[in-house]
Amino acid sequence: MSAAFGFAPEGVTTSLGMYMIYFAFSGCEFIFDAKTSKPVKASAYDIFQSLWRLLRVGIINTLFFSYLAHFDYMPFGRDRTHYLDPNHLGNCFCIARECI
């Protein structure tokens, strides 16, 4: 949506490669230096924090779904074939992109 309406941070427009990376990984957070318009590198602490959050969410989801399995809960139902239909996958992708 940002590209369609002509919005892009100043640092993104410095090169075609940075422009493509920015819009290909729109779920990621990019921080640009105000003076140089170049991306600021993530510190080791930032990377550790991101990995810890990912691990924590994975553990919580595993515990949650393991608990629900005792009650015959199945997140996708019994018939899973229609989830691989290209139309369904396209709709899910469009909705997911709008939520970011």
Image: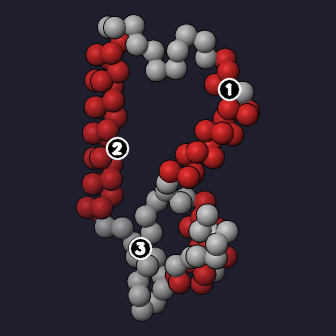
Query: Residue flagged by tag 2: what amino acid is it?
Result: Leu
Crowding around mark 1 (Cα neighbors within 10 Å: few <14, some 14 to 19, many 20+) is few
Q: What number is the disc on residue 74?
A: none
The image shows residue 27, relative to residue 5, as above or below, that is above
Determine the image quadrant of residue 48: bottom left
- Label 3 packing within 10 angstroms: few (<14), some (14-19), many (20+): some
Q: Where does label 2 land, which residue?
A: 54
Q: Amino acid at mark 3?
A: Ile
**Number of numbered tags placed on the structure image:** 3
Residue 6: x percent and y percent?
A: 64, 76
- Label disc, if present, on residue 84 of the rendered structure: 1
Q: Residues within 10 Å of mark 2 (few under 14, many from 20)?
A: few
Q: Which residue is mark 3?
A: 31
Query: Which residue type does callout 1 highlight?
Result: Leu
Report whether residue 71 is seen.
yes
Label 2 vs 1, first from the N-terminus: 2
Callout 2 touching callout 3 (CB < 8 Å): no
> Residue at coordinates 60% horizontally, 60% vertically from top-left?
24
Task: Name the foreground residue: 83 vs 98.
Answer: 98
Q: CA distance from mark 2 to mark 1?
A: 26 Å
